[in-house]
Amino acid sequence: MGTSDNYQTIVVQTDDGVSTITLNRPDSLNAFNEAMKAELLDTLKKAERDDAIRCLVITGEGRAFSSGQDLADLKDVYAGTDPPDLGQMLRDAYNPLIKKMRGMDKPIIAAVNGVAAGAGCSFAFACDIRIASENASFIESFVLVGLIPDCGGTFFLPRLVGVGTAMEMCMTGRKIAADEALRMGLVQQVVEPEQLMDATMELARKLASMPTKAIGLTKRLINQSYGNDLAAQLEAEAFAQTTAARTDDHFEGVRAFNEKRPPTFTGK
């Protein structure tokens, strides 16, 4: 197992093709400050370029996944009388992070260990798959401080749970417990707290052993489907299938099927 770089707000470990990123500001419930946003974007860029990394896991240290934006980090912004330009803060720091997560051709699993609130909630929704501890909860808390959901919250949430439920969550800011999140389709699995990382790593290692390029193309197609009509999506699938058919893993999969043996995929 390797630990990457000298980050101050996150811990990154890589093992068996899986890079685990732990948000590591437990005293602030892993709230996002400027350093954390910058370090997350940096490690995501490095993981994207590293062919040895075939799956990513994001989790939190302590009792929270992330409580969202660290308001203490904005103390100076609110010290004056002029309204803060929060939109520019999104453009500069949060939006590049969300775009990188969705645009990366590698699967990202959120292991939600505790509360995910505000930007932390949207951050979990931006991951491809979510596994939650029984202690996890989700709160679109923006309305409670007079703001709107950002970091893609208004994009991902209605696609996960439907428009009516998304409206209700965003307009009331109520807490969604793990069991309700499972029923709603917000998460794919709920486990006991002590089993969270074992269950997550089991899935992550499985994904890391599968045809990485095919998974990346699938992720890209599902993202494109949000804006495509049927004809455009069918053409996108045909183009992607041509690409997938040229990979080593496709040929290995066919050979393994014909030879009646398990395939050994290399991600190439």
Image (cartoon, grey):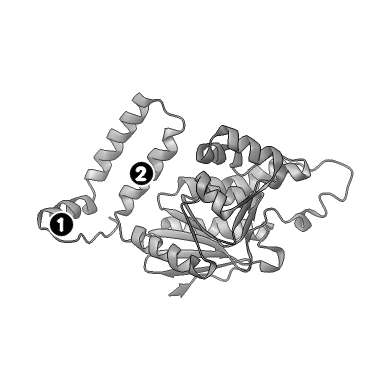
**Residue at 42%, 28% in the rendered image:** 228
Q: In which quarter of the image is the C terminus?
A: bottom left
87, above or below 209, in the image: above
Category of crowding for the residue at label 1, using alpha-carbon neighbours closer than 10 angstroms: few (below 14), some (14–19), many (at least 20): some
Residue toward you, 163 or 156: 163
120, above or below 160, in the image: below
**Residue at 22%, 46% in the rendered image:** 246
Q: Which amino acid does label 1 sit on?
A: Ala
Quadrant of res 225 = top left
Residue situated furthest left in the rendering: 259
Q: Which residue lies under the disc numbered 1?
A: 256
102, above or below 168, in the image: below
Can residue 57 be spotted in the picture? yes
Q: What residue type is labelled 2?
A: Thr
Percent across and percent down for residue 91 are: 64, 42
Percent across and percent down for residue 169 are: 64, 41
* Element class at badge 1: helix
Can residue 100 be spotted in the picture? no
223, above or below 268, in the image: above
Percent across and percent down for residue 258 are: 10, 53
**Is there a contact, CB below 8 Å, between mark 2 and mark 1?**
no
Residues under labels 2 and 1: Cα distance?
A: 22 Å
Residue situated furthest bottom in the rendering: 1
Q: Quadrant of the N terminus?
A: bottom left
Mark 2 or mark 1, which has the lower sequence index? 2
Quadrant of res 165 = top right
* Element class at badge 2: helix
**Residue at 40%, 44% in the rendered image:** 219
Task: Give the label on residue 218, or none.
Answer: 2
Task: Give the label on residue 152, or none.
Answer: none
Residue toward you, 15 or 198: 198
